[in-house]
Amino acid sequence: MLQQYSRIMVAVDGSQEAELAFKKALNVAKRNQAELLLLHVIDARAFQTMTSFDTMLAEQATDMAKTSLKEYEEMAHKQGVENVKTLIEYGSPKTVIAKYIPDEHQIDLILLGATGLNAVERLFIGSVSEYVIRHAPCDVLVVRTDLNNQLPKDE
């Protein structure tokens, strides 16, 4: 019996890696006739480092995320994925992607792009994908290649 996924989540942040994950998520969702949850996490910690929480910056980040998710949702519908939901969350991307959303929405597959962090960056801030792999309650697919399983060309 083939593995069947019913609720697939893809984390998108506007990066090239997230774009690759989104495209693969579309294919997996179509093959499985699954619900696709498009998630954008706004890292609230970035705003906490300022002396006063700047609500205008947070609103701008939210507006940009809404616009981006709307575009992703439209692309998904054009590609034949019927059941698409979008979600913006605030907090640490690691824990939101790995723990909070999968539990809250009964996600059975997470797709996310591989990050471009070097060894020093991973040491200090840690890789989101590494954390998700270790802590998610479901299958995780870290996407590195395009739909032809080729590494993307550096632009």
Image (cartoon, rainbow, N blue to C red):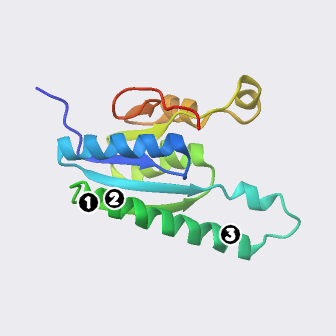
Q: Is residue 58 above or below residue 94?
A: below
Q: Is residue 76 above or below residue 139?
A: below
Q: Left of 102 or right of it: where is 80?
A: left
Query: Which residue is identified by label 1?
Result: 78
SS at mark 3 in the image: helix
Circle 3 residue: 58
Percent position of residue 115, x then y: 59, 35
Q: Nearer the viewer, residue 97 or 146?
A: 146
> Which residue shows up at 51% across the image and 40% down it?
17
Q: Position of residue 151 (x, y in %)?
A: 47, 27
Q: Residue at x 54, y 34 (%)?
A: 129
Residue that numbered label 2 is attached to: 75
Q: Amino acid at mark 3?
A: Ala
Q: Which label sits in the foreground, 3 or 1?
A: 1
Pointer 3 and pointer 2: residues touching (CB < 8 Å)? no
Residue 141, horizontal then vertical, whole percent: 40, 32
Give how far apart the Cα atoms at labels 3 and 2 are: 26 Å
Residue 148 is left or right of residue 5, and the answer is right
Measure the C-alpha gap from mark 3 to mark 1: 30 Å
Residue, x 72% and y 36% (percent of image)? 125
Badge 1 element:
helix
Residue drawn where x is 72% and y is 55% of the image? 45
Q: Earlier in the sequence, mark 3 or mark 1?
A: 3
